[in-house]
Image (cartoon, rainbow, N blue to C red):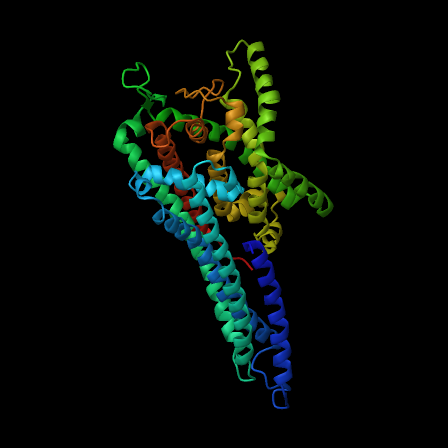
Amino acid sequence: MNTANILLILLLLVGFSYVIGRKRSLALAKPNPQRKGSNLHSLPGYYGHLVAIWCGIPALVILLLWNTFNTPIATSLVSNSLPVEIQSQSTEQIGLFMNRIQSAVNQGNINELTDPTQKQAAEYYQSILNISNMAKTVLVLVLAILGIFYGLRLIKPELRARNRVEKVATFFMASCASIAILTTAGIVFSVLFESIRFFSDVSILDFLFGTHWSPQTALRADQVGSSGSFGFIPLLVGTLLISAIALLVAVPLGLMSAIYLSEYASKPVRNIAKPALEVLAGIPTVVYGFFAALTVAPFIRDTGEALGLSVASESALAAGIVMGIMIIPFMSSLSDDVINAVPQAMRDGSYGMGATKSETIKQVIIPAALPGIVGAFLLAASRAIGETMIVVMAAGMSANLTINPLEAVTTVTVQIVALLTGDQEFDSTKTLAAFALGLTLFLMTLVLNVIALHIVRKYREQYD
């Protein structure tokens, strides 16, 4: 039986165990006039949950462990049974041999193998898997049934079922949080280790302060003109240039939208305008990219040529403007929440002093909401720095060291995509450069997020 069917049966058993566990607790319950209820320590549902836990968790743990070690153990058994002449080959050749066998078994093509040794090994491998699947099915289902009986035997009126169930729930939630944290740490360390390999080939000073980016490396030792140049500065300038343009568009429009929606708009208008504005956040970035490449970039080029300016077909200005439009709902929504958190009593006090609405907004509301607005600004900046699709389609991939928004530039994220695209060897300097860029980008956004959180926590005011 495959894993999906086992899980389906296990799910049915868990549901059944909950029902009979709850019924058994009700059957054991006796009226307790002092407690104005029954003599059960916990609600009947907790007893049902406890039986379901004993039914499901041990069986799931065994199923997980079995699936994890099933293939390696089967592969090891088959490898040890191979003829001596095959076992004497290199590890790579044995691995290739086993891959062919596993592929034939997984695709059901054992009879199509022409090599008798391979066919015999595949049949042996198939028989091991069949026995393993049968043993796994029996063991998991037996464990689940035994868990039901054990859970039912535990049920007594004085059993603290709620405490036990809550302990399991707490452990489960802590495990989920730990998995999220460990996953993040794993990603960081994997990027860090690959970056260290890159910096063993390229000086970190040349990377951080180099002004030329050309990651093409030589495929042969005698090849000329492709030694590779990994200067990070053009990518950093391009990233900051496009992000600055995006923020110049998004911050004023987003902040003004938030002020209008929270202070001037009537409730019907707000109920319509805010969801309509936030629809922009749900549009895929590739759609923004098409809009930038087909509409905004040609418009900027034609306008620039009409004014006698030299404008590239793909420019930082087009990408920055469209990226800013994309970030507007992000900035607007966060600012709106912050402004609405300012208590009405502060507005009323300002109006009581004779201030107008605009004076109240400028002198009272904005200063009170400033930490949150700054935090929204920095988080929007992190979003702009990490955007890729719009830059690829509207700003090009030229690593030009320029601050002219009418020229084509590129960003860190775009170069990461370019470096990892194609058939380049994974351990080449060119490919490893993507990890160095990723680590640098991670540190940049991490610093911005830490600054944003620090500002929000330091200057946050608690209102009623």
* As drawn, 28 above or below 133: below
Q: Is residue 53 visible?
A: no
Q: Residue at x 55, y 48 (%)?
A: 338
Residue 407 visible: yes
Q: Quadrant of residue 403?
A: top left
Q: Residue at x 44, y 20 (%)?
A: 398
Depth check: give the residue in front, 218 or 80: 80
Most extreme residue toward the right, as rendered? 268
Q: Position of residue 112 (x, y in %)?
A: 51, 37
**Location of residue 91 in the rendering, given as x and y in whole percent from the top left corner:** 31, 40
154 to the left or right of 22: left
Classify the position of the N terminus by image quarter.
Answer: bottom right
Relative to the observer, which residue lies in front, 424 or 329? 424
Residue 209 vs 154, above or below: the answer is: above
- Image coordinates of residue 447 in percent, x first then y, are 39, 42
Q: Across the whole image, how many numbered discs are drawn on residues?
A: 0
In the displayed structure image, the side of residue 70 where residue 326 appears, left or right: right
Question: Which part of the image, by quadrant, shows the C terminus?
Answer: bottom right
The x and y percentages for residue 29 are 62, 85
Q: Residue at x 53, y 84 (%)?
A: 158
Task: Determine which quarter of the picture holds residue 188.
Answer: top left
Left or right: 408 as drawn, with respect to 279: left
Residue sitting nearer the eye, 336 or 221: 221
Quarter of the image for residue 324 reads top right
> Looking at this view, is 63 or 354 the one in front?
63
User: Residue pushed farthest bottom?
Assistant: 33
